[in-house]
Image (cartoon, rainbow, N blue to C red):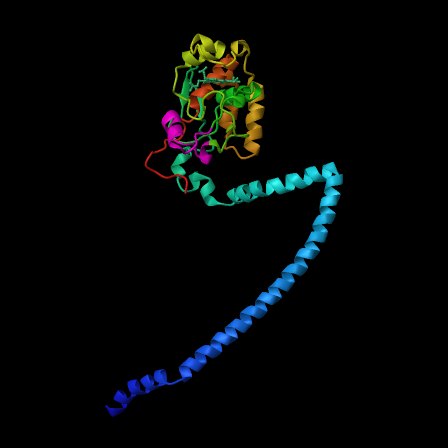
Amino acid sequence: MADKQSLPTGLQRLLESKIWGMLWSMLNTLWRMLKSSLKALFGFLERRILSVMSVFARILQDFLERRILGMVIAVALVLSVGGIVEIVPLFYLESTQEANRFPEIVWNRDNPGSQPIVTLDAEGQEQWNWQAGDGVRPYTALELAGRDVYQREGCYLCHSQQVRPFRDERERYGHYSLASESMFDHPFQWGSKRTGPDMARVGGKYSDEWHRQHLTAPRSVVPESVMPGYPWLAKRAVKGGRMKRHMRGLRAIGVPYNDADIDMAPNLVEGKTEMDAMIAYLQVLGTMAKLEPGIDYRQ
Ligand code: HEC
C-alpha cells in the first residue's frame, strides 16, 4: 500500500527535476546539427548533379537541334509517355471490360458450338436465336457487310460511336457507351469527330424506310443536313463469299463465330444490297446489351 503511493510522487519528482529540461535541449541541439549537415550534403549533391546534367542536356539539345529526324523521334517519344501511361494499364485491368463484372452484358449462346445467331427457315424467313437486349454478340453477315461499307465510305469522319458519360450526352443519345459494347469491333468505330450526331445508339431510333430515304438523299428528310447522299449503295450487291472469308478472319482474332454463323453468311446476304446491309448495321447499333440506368458499370 505504501509502495503504491510513493510511485506517483517519484514520477512527480523526476518531472520537476532538471534532467528533463537538459534531455530536451540535448535532443534539440542534435536535431539542429543533423538538419544543417543534411542540408549542406543535399545542396552539394544537387549542385553536382545539376552541373553534370546541364552538360548532358546541352549536348543533347545541340544534337537534336541539328538533326530534324532526331528531333521528330524525341518529340514523339516525349509526347507518347502520357498516352502510354494511360493506355497500357487498361490492357491489364479487369475493370476495363465491364463484362468481367457484369457477365450479362455479353450474349450467352445456349449451344455455342452449333447455334447460329440467325438462320433462314424453309420459306427463307430469318429465324433469330438472339433478340435485342440479350447481350453483345458478333455481327451477323449482313450487319458486318454494312459495317464494312460504313468504313469504306468514311462515315466515321463525321459520326462518332461513343456516348460519353456526361449528362447532356446521356439525355441526347442514351446510356453512355461501355468498352464491352465494342468488344467484337475490329477496328472500333469510336471516332473523334461529330459533324453529325453520335451513332452509338442510333439502332431503333428510325424506321428502315427513313434510313433508306435519308441515306439516298439526306436533305429530302432533313432539309438543313450537310450529309452527303449515298444513292449508289442501293445498286451494289453484297458478296457472300467475301463475308465468309471476313468472318473466318475475325474468328482467327477472337470473335466467337461458330461454323453455323459462317456457313449461313452467303444465304443471309443473298439478294441484299449494300443499302440493306448498312441499314441492318445501323439498326443494331447500341441495342445489343440492356443497360440499367441505376447500375454503375464503370468502376
Ligand atoms: C460530311 C459529314 C457526314 C458524313 C460523311 C456522313 N454523315 Fe451522317 N450525318 C451528318 C449530319 C450533319 C447529320 C445530321 C443531319 C441529318 O440528319 O442528316 C447526319 C445524320 C445522320 C444520321 C441520323 C442520325 C440521327 O440520330 O438523327 C444517320 C443514321 C447517318 N447520318 C448515317 C450516316 C452514314 C451511314 C454515313 C456513311 C455512309 C454518314 N452518315 C456519313 C453528316 C455526315
Q: Position of residue 279 (x, y in %)?
A: 46, 17
Instruction: Locate residue 154 relative to residue 198 in the image: left or right.
Output: right
Q: Position of residue 79 (x, y in %)?
A: 61, 40
**Range of residues picked out in magenta:** 162-181
Q: Is residue 192 magenta?
A: no
Q: Position of residue 53 (x, y in %)?
A: 68, 54
In this view, the residue in front, 227 or 188, is 227
Q: Quadrant of residue 51?
A: bottom right
Instruction: Locate residue 43 relative to residue 3 in the image: left or right.
Output: right
In this view, the residue in front, 277 or 156, is 156
- The N terminus is located in which quarter? bottom left
Q: What residue is at 48 percent from the left and 9 percent from the top?
A: 217
Q: What residue is at 67 percent from the left and 41 percent from the top?
A: 74
Q: What residue is at 50 percent from the left and 17 percent from the top?
A: 269
In this view, the residue in front, 283 or 115, is 283
How many numbered circles does the render carry?
Answer: 0
Q: Is residue 167 magenta?
A: yes
Q: Position of residue 100 (x, y in %)?
A: 43, 42
- The C terminus is located in which quarter? top left
Q: What residue is at 58 percent from the left and 25 percent from the top?
A: 245
Q: Where is 220 relative to 163, above or below?
A: above
In this view, the residue in front, 22 or 140, is 22
Instruction: Locate residue 230 relative to residue 14 in the image: left or right.
Output: right
Q: Single out the residue that lies furthest toward the bottom.
A: 2
Q: Where is 5 relative to 189, above or below?
A: below
Q: Quadrant of residue 99?
A: top left
